[in-house]
Structure formats: structure tokens, C-alpha cells
Image (cartoon, coloured by chain):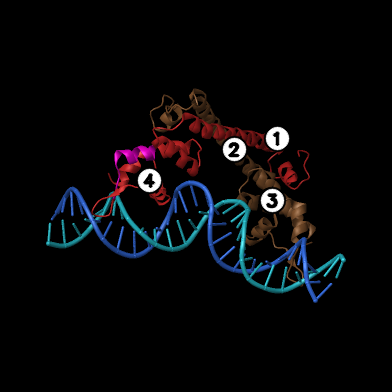
Chain colours: A red, B brown, C blue, D cyan
Amino acid sequence: MNIGIASEKSGLPAKTIRYYEDIGLLHPARTDNGYRDYSTADIHRLRFLQRSRSLGFSVDECRQLLSLYQDRERDSADVKEIAKAKLVEIDRKIAELVGLRGLLHHLVSHCHGDERPDCPIIDELAGQGVAQ
Amino acid sequence: MNIGIASEKSGLPAKTIRYYEDIGLLHPARTDNGYRDYSTADIHRLRFLQRSRSLGFSVDECRQLLSLYQDRERDSADVKEIAKAKLVEIDRKIAELVGLRGLLHHLVSHCHGDERPDCPIIDELAGQGVAQ
DNA sequence: ATAGACCTTCCAGTAGATGGAAGGTCAACA
DNA sequence: TGTTGACCTTCCATCTACTGGAAGGTCTAT
């Protein structure tokens, strides 16, 4: 299977698939003409990567998950640990963004947004604002 | 004022301050010995940068905000536009993370997390799960 | 005089791709 | 058979926003 087809089937751009090979996440065969030749197992790996990346796992975490995925003897506890750590991280990110959103929303709603130069957003950024 | 003091006053690492100069965000004076010499106006710019970066604005957005900040004739509408766009972006990011969180939480809570190899998290990543 | 804290420049590396150039290959159509 | 166009290859550069480190100059205190 050529890389174009692998790209279609996995939902990953060809560039990304080559990149994943570069960093050792998979090792597709080659045909006589030098083209990469993807097996269905390769496609599974690629789809696995696409899903776990889109779930917010880093490439290195994906590497771990992938090796757990391949390992029929693994403990589900190992997988759960990684996923739980990621969950904590996501919660932290959400809280941070919600805080940001609150401040920014406050600023936007207090800026009259017309042709006058005075602006509470700039005041805040300059450290002159009320919201701290 | 030397860079160490500027760093303390702005809350930005010296490395970052030099980097901001490299990319043209400020142009501090130099003393005879070649050391950077920060004015209080420079410190204001740096604090402005620190605040707007921590509010989630990109360096390029900071550049725009900074020029609006310097421009006594600016329309507050211009500033509000940038802030509103950022707000939309933050909302989008939050929604995405909340979605992720839901799926991951579901998976974690359904994984028994023991020494057995079967694991719904891996199943999902492999495309065998119920949650899609 | 010298130690240690500062400062300088420059180069490389991080994550996770993405864009583009230069060139090889393949399938179809006239 | 020739040639067009889609596909593939490698390699190198670029992006964001820094960060780390080496090699070396300067300043201050003792």
C-alpha cells in the first residue's frame, strides 16, 4: 500500500507519516522502486497514533502506549496510569484557560470598542487596570 | 538598568528579554561596556509583554497590541477586535479539551487497571472501542 | 590579585510537524 | 512511443517561543 493510501486510511498527512517513521514509530517495508509499502498492521499503528495524538497524548506518550498496545502481556494498570496522568494535565489546562477566559471576557465587555483611544484592555496589559 | 534587574522587574527571564530584542520587540540602549541599559519605558514594555503573553496572546499579537499601546491615537475598537478573536479561540480550545476530558475520563473509569492485559483504553485507541 | 557574579555573543536544541525544491516512477492516453 | 500528470523519493529549511550551554569580557568586593 503506497503512502497516499496509508494517508487516506489513517487520516494522517503523508508528511506526518514519513515524520513518524523518521522518529522510529513505525518501519514500513519498501517495494523494489523504493516506495514505502504499508501493511494493514502498519495502518493500525497509524490509526492508533492518529487517535492517541488527537486525544492529546504527546508523541513520546504515544510511543509508550503503542508498545503497550503491541504487548499482549501488558498490565492494564500501566495504560491506566498514563491515561490518568494525562487526565490531570487536561484538567489543569482547562482550569487555566477558564481563568484566562474570565479575565479576557471581563476586559472585552468593559471596552467600549469605538474610535476613542481609552481602552481598559490596554490599561490592564500596561498594569494600570483594576483587574489583577 | 542591567538585564538582571529588568528581568526581576518584568518577571521575564533574561534569555527571553534578549530574545524579544532579537525579534524586534524592544530596543534598549547600551552602556559603554556593551551591557544593555533598560529605561523605565523599556520595563513597561517588558511587563506589558509578560502580561499579554500570559493572557495567551501570541508574540505576533503582542507586537500588534504593543504598537496600539504606544499609539496614543489608537481606536479602542482595534484592541477590542484582537481581544475578541482571542476569546473565541480560547473558547474553542476549552470546548476541545472538555471533549477530550470526557472521552478520557470515560476510558479511565472503565479500565479495571490491574494485571490483566485487557484494557478498554487500548481498545479505543486501536479503534475497537465503543466510544468513538 | 583574584573570586564570583554578572554581562556579552553565538550556536544548537526542543516539539511536532509543514513547505518546498529537485528528481525518480508509474499509469493512461494520443 | 512519447509525454503528461499524479504520485513517490530525499533533503533542507521553516515555524513558535523560547531554553541551554560554551567561551569569553566586566564589575565589585575582599
Q: Which residue is mark 1?
A: A106
Q: Which residue is mark 3?
A: B49
Number of callouts: 4
Q: Is residue B42 above or below residue B90?
A: below
Q: Residue at x 75, y 58 (%)?
A: B4
Dot 4 and dot 3 within a common chain: no
Q: Is residue A117 above or below residue B7?
A: above
Q: Residue at x 78, y 57 (%)?
A: B5
- Which image quarter holds the C terminus of chain B? top left
Mark 2 belongs to which amino acid?
Ile
Q: Secondary structure at mark 4?
A: loop
Mark 3 belongs to which amino acid?
Leu
- Which image quarter holds the N terminus of chain B? bottom right
Q: Residue at x 49, y 23 (%)?
A: B110
Q: Secondary structure at mark 3?
A: helix
Q: Chain of mark 4?
A: A
Label 1 to label 2: alpha-carbon separation: 14 Å
The answer to whether residue B55 shows anywhere in this view is yes
Q: Which residue is mark 2?
A: B90
**Image location of residue B66, percent across then percent down:** 68, 52
Which numbered disc, 3 or 1, marks the residue closer to the eye?
A: 3
**Image location of residue B113, percent across then percent down:** 50, 26
Which of pointers 4 and 1 lies earlier in the amino acid sequence? 4
Which numbered disc, 4 or 1, marks the residue closer to the eye?
A: 4
Task: Name which quarter of the figure residue A119 lies in.
Answer: top right
Q: Residue at x 64, y 33 (%)?
A: A95
